[in-house]
Image (tube, rainbow, N blue to C red):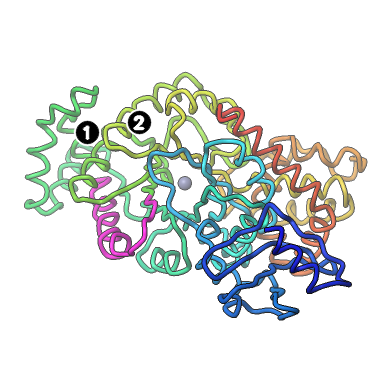
Amino acid sequence: MDRYIVKIRQAMPDGDIWIKESTYAQTEGLRAIYATAAEKECLIVDGCKAFLFEGEAVGGIKICPLNHANRLVLNMEIGYTRPQAIGAATASFGCGDRLGLANAGQLAAVRQTRVKPVLAQQSLRELYLTGRSYDDVIDAASWAVFKSGYREGYGADGDHLKTKQEVEAALEHGCSMITLDCSGVLKEPPAQAEALSRAYERIPARKRLILEEEYLNLTHAASIGITYTRQTWMEILVTYLDAVELAEEIYMELICSRGRRIDYEISLDETVHTTSAAAHYFVARELKKRHVRISSIAPKFVGEFQKGIDYIGDTESFRRNLRIHCVVAACYGHKVSIHSGSDKFRVFPVIADETKGLFHVKTSGTSWLEAVRVIARNAPDLYRRMHWIALEHLDEARSYYKVDCDVSVVKPLDTATDDELPAYIDQDDSRQLMHIAYGILLRDKKMQDEIYASLRKNEAAYRRQVEQHIEKHLISLQCL
Ligand SMILES: [Zn+2]
């Protein structure tokens, strides 16, 4: 490395250059390092593969911008910058970064632990609301990984996808994880016995009868405390069979033939009903039987997991609920995944305990809220305008996310001094208000520019803020 640095300095004798040595990477035919030259971020490469990168050749080295084309080459040549599957045997933490500026802080927190980060994690709703693409999101994550010299591997999650087309697009763009949101095919079982029987009998007999025979006589399920009465069995088959079939079809057509490992998560959580252990068992067992390899299942738990605020409900009921899901997951070798996992400090110790440290926890908006906090602290006027717009468009924001958020209890903005603004990010109702308003704020181009400019100006503060906040999560999850 030292010789490479000497070479760079010789090539740019009058250059105002700062080189980050910990990012140095060498592979066959390529040396690469991150630097800033004349205050501009760049990748400096040499070697016979340097021609693959876009950039300016100077005295035997090449100075390359951190753009999309160069990210693709970097991913190809330096493996750890490419999203990769994490698997079912390692704990993982979904970070999510709506702005593309939070990954550095997230990495700083995660790198002190054994937990693998899923740095890029966007649902279609988030892509739509932020006006970003999978390419943007993976660009940001790849460069953040390279710039921080983190070499342990990270994931990219095509989150809450519902159709083959959506899954295909996410895989094409390099996602290493697919979260199949089954809510579109989860059926509501009729409450009335007769209607339930009719719905059950509409399932083709050739599928129904074999499964019925199997599940009503399962000794393995009984050995872990799961039994199927005729009634619960009918409800489960009516509710979940289509989801199993969709998960199987997508796996067979798009995932197993990919030529690379993919983390496949089955999400059952976007529904009003709590997922029973018997339902979880059915889905997991059917997928295994059909040779579908999954890395995690996200059940819907008792209590409420609302965006950006703590768990609502009884933590002991949650513990019992999670425990039986963990037993099922352990039987089939996948992780339990906890969605809307940001800021659930009351139950993080329970999650750590019951999963024995093997979990997938997803957070996404919480890093955005830390961005809002940095703005409230450093650009009070901008914060005030964001707050007003969020209030003005509350109904629309609520159509994207289900939150309790009662704005009548939020302290009126015109009575708050500038020093009091960051406190809005700590109060649950105003916190949720800002949490769900991100799409509305970012689609206003002028406001978007101001938000980015403010965060870039306070980049170090934002990085620290995100690091501390994610660290707080990981401490509570007993990873630190
Ligand atoms: Zn979910």
Q: Residue at x 49, y 27 (%)?
A: 352
How many labels sit on residues?
Answer: 2
- In space, the residues marked 1 and 2 are separated at their CA atoms by 17 Å
Which quadrant is home to the N terminus?
bottom right
Q: Position of residue 127 (x, y in %)?
A: 57, 63
Q: Residue at x 44, y 57 (%)?
A: 176
Judging by the rendered image, the residue that carries numbered circle 1 is 232
Q: Residue at x 53, y 54 (%)?
A: 121
Q: Residue at x 7, y 45 (%)?
A: 209
Name the outermost residue toward the top: 316
Q: Give left or right: position of 359 versus 423.
A: left
- What type is the residue that disc 2 sits on? His
Dot 2 crowding, Cα within 10 Å, few <14, some 14–19, many 20+: many
- Hey, which quadrant is residue 396 in on the image? bottom right
Judging by the rendered image, the residue that carries numbered circle 2 is 325
**In front: mark 1 or mark 2?**
2
Q: Position of residue 245 (x, y in %)?
A: 24, 54
Q: Does any atom of ligand 1 lie closer than 8 Å to the CB of label 1?
A: no
Q: Earlier in the sequence, mark 1 or mark 2?
A: 1
Q: Is residue 246 magenta?
A: yes
Q: Position of residue 279 (x, y in %)?
A: 28, 37
Q: Is residue 143 magenta?
A: no
